[in-house]
Image (tube, rainbow, N blue to C red):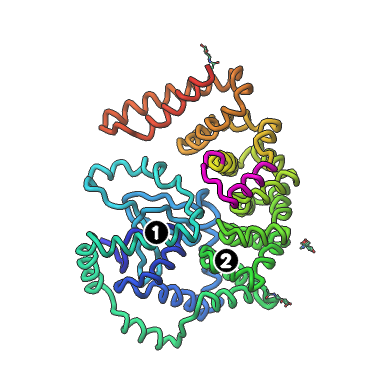
Amino acid sequence: MSPSICSLPVVSGLSLVVLLFSVTSFPSCLSDRVTEFALTKKEESDLKEQNKEEVVRVEEEDLDPEDMEVFYPTHQWQTVRPGQAVPAGLHVQLNLQTGERLARLPDNNDEKSDVKDTSKNKRLGPIDLDPSSFTTQELKKALAKMKESVKSDDMLEQKAHQEDVRRRFRPIEKLKEEFRELNMQLETDFEIMFKLINRFNSTTSTLEEKIAALYDLEYYVHQVDNAKDLLSLGGLQLLINGLNSTEPLLKEYSSFVLGAALSSNPRVQVAAVDGGALQKLLVVLATDQSLAVKKKALFALSSMLRNFPYAQQQFLRLGGLQILRDLCTEKGTETLHVRIVTLLYDLIIERLLLKESQDDDELLQEKTQQYHQVNLTPAITEQGWCTIISNLLKLPEHDTREKVLKTVHVLLAFCRDNYKGDHGLNHTLRLLRQEYEELAAEEQKEGDEDGYFKELLSSINSIAQQLK
Ligand SMILES: *[C@@H]1O[C@H](CO)[C@@H](O)[C@H](O)[C@H]1NC(C)=O
Ligand SMILES: *[C@@H]1O[C@H](CO)[C@@H](O)[C@H](O)[C@H]1NC(C)=O
Ligand SMILES: *[C@@H]1O[C@H](CO)[C@@H](O)[C@H](O)[C@H]1NC(C)=O
């Protein structure tokens, strides 16, 4: 069915896959690191021709799809592109021959009936998890869980699977031999990153080579420790400098790598703010740039702000919210609008979750203190975000509406006065209700009791109810 060597449930994130593999050392999966090297090396050794191709390919498949950073799983195997974050609980496979990673939703018992639901699954469930939000602690937990599950009832399945893998794939000795033939040495992540950073920084590198180096680097910095090495190698400042390069592609790819390195990595977040990344990202977002550049800058900005009140405070102080608002009222940048709304939603929710938390340890109090200095919600209401956001309900995509509805829902606490007498909103909600009543009815006819559309409908009803 599929050309893979390893198949196991995985926690999250491409690099986490690698991390877990290398720590737990599944006997059948021993060489995915190795493959990674092999690929990197191949690109290096085939030099310019290949590099050029690589850049062209990257531009085609990478700059366009709006949801580059999140992988939308279905029950079918799909290729995971570099840089995509894989939600928790998926089956992930690595094809040793091509280095391609594939992922899909885990099997249910009723795989057949699930097939027709894939379109809905795309928008549901696991994608809500923010895969970048894994802490070391959670990682360790996940690791422990994996070990457990290997020990316990998965044992038989695991065995059978290993046999299967062994039959189908080249044994490691064979692989090693091939590596030797290619005259390759295994390198550590640190060494590879050192080379990539140097290539990016070198005055003799062509633009293509620099972009290719950034593209590869992005893969490595997802891993927390690698991102710290990026810092100690001086790579972070180089990336920050790249943000105001005169070359749009360098702006874009520097943002891309920064976004990955910043994700849930407090040390990098602090260093990036101190290194002036915030100002530069805001300049990118406020000036005339291509959509592709802005997308990646917004990605980096989001990674910087999430769970980091200090950066949020600076962001407000620098007028960041106004810059996002201007973007949000621009025509033709709807994909950005949705991402901005999602960011605001996340920022509001992270504050609310903090308040709910009963824990009274010192660190948390410190954090609560910091959040108190971030006047996010007053700024949101004062700047007219209530209406800007509710207007986005008019966009046609279901998953956009889902995100906007969620946001309107949390905004009700702050935007009630704006929303109560808003005839436009009343009208929009009525139209949406009609549409989703029909879709939900169809869904139910097909036997789906707790369907996606029913969920959207109840969200609409709940908002309307609270506005009465
Ligand atoms: C980048 O290159 C410059 C000059 O070539 C050098 O001084 C600097 O140390 C390099 N930075 C890094 C992080 O390698
Ligand atoms: C980028 O910004 C730095 C200061 O933050 C400045 O020294 C440098 O000249 C700028 N580069 C370009 C290409 O504008
Ligand atoms: C929306 O408009 C309808 C009439 O068209 C009215 O009955 C209803 O109360 C309004 N709801 C809100 C929340 O304003």
* Labelled pair 2, 1 in contact (Cβ < 8 Å): no
Vertical position of residue 256 compared to residue 200: above or below? above
Q: Is residue 298 something one can see in this rendering?
A: no
Numbered disc 1: secondary structure: helix
Give the residue pinned by disc 2: 227
Q: Position of residue 326 (x, y in %)?
A: 69, 39
For residue 134: magenta? no
Q: Is residue 6 something one can see in this rendering?
A: yes
Numbered disc 2: secondary structure: helix
Amino acid under disc 1: Ala
Residue extent of the magenta highlight:
355-373
Vertical position of residue 347 compared to residue 242: above or below? above
At 50% from the left and 55% from the top, the residue drawn is 132
For residue 372: magenta? yes
Q: Position of residue 122 (x, y in %)?
A: 39, 44
In the rendered structure, the answer to whether residue 122 lies left or right of residue 422 reads: left
At 43% from the left and 31% from the top, the residue drawn is 456
The residue lying toward the viewer, choosing from 137 and 312, is: 137
- Total labels drawn: 2
Place residue 164 in its image quadrant.
bottom left
Place residue 9 in its image quadrant.
bottom left
Task: Classify mark 1: residues with Cα within 10 Å, few (<14), some (14-19) or many (20+).
Answer: some
Q: Main secondary structure of the magenta part?
A: helix
Label of residue 142 in the image = 1
Label of residue 289 in the image = none
At 24% from the left and 69% from the top, the residue drawn is 162
